[in-house]
Amino acid sequence: MEKRFGALSSSVDPNKLSMRVNGVIMALSGTIIWAAGHFLNITLTPENVVELAGQLGGLAGALATVFGVVRWCVTTIAEKKRE
């Protein structure tokens, strides 16, 4: 069975993104918030955390959209080349 997305492909359905990759993407927002507070010595108030989480959520949504569009383009081009 051919994996369309290489190492990023799901082992169950090669046409879908791996759950491990999805999990990493979901975990990044919490890690970034922690790293910002810890390494940059930023005092994070609850309001700052909520604002940062909202911005990271927007960024994650934008990245997921771009990734989905790129994946769609790659899949479409690959299917047209097979014909």
Image (cartoon, rainbow, N blue to C red):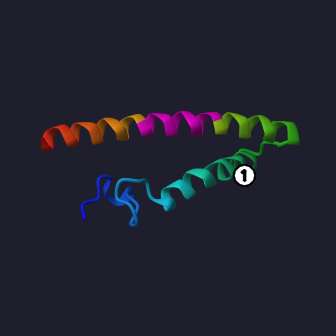
Residue 19: give x, y in percent of width and height.
50, 60
Task: Give 55 or 43, whichever is nearer the viewer.
Answer: 55
| Residue 20 part of the magenta segment | no
Q: Which residues are magenta?
A: 58-68
- Residue at the spot x=41%, y=61% of the render? 10
Task: Give 62 or 13, whichever is nearer the viewer.
Answer: 13
| Residue 67 part of the magenta segment | yes
Classify residue 79 by image quadrant. Answer: top left
* Quadrant holding the C terminus: top left
Task: Give 62 or 11, whichever is nearer the viewer.
Answer: 11
Q: Which residue is mark 1?
A: 34
* Quadrant holding the N terminus: bottom left
- Residue at the spot x=43%, y=39% of the render? 68
Residue 46: give x, y in percent of width and height.
87, 42
Task: Give 6 or 53, whichever is nearer the viewer.
Answer: 6
Say which element carries label 1.
Answer: helix
Residue 69: give x, y in percent of width and height.
40, 34
Quick check: 30 left or right of 81?
Answer: right
- Residue at the spot x=49%, y=35% of the render? 65
How many marks can you see?
Answer: 1
Quick check: 26 left or right of 64?
Answer: right
Classify residue 18 by image quadrant. Answer: bottom left
Q: Main secondary structure of the magenta part?
A: helix
User: As shown in the figure, which amino acid type bears the numbered disc 1?
Assistant: Trp
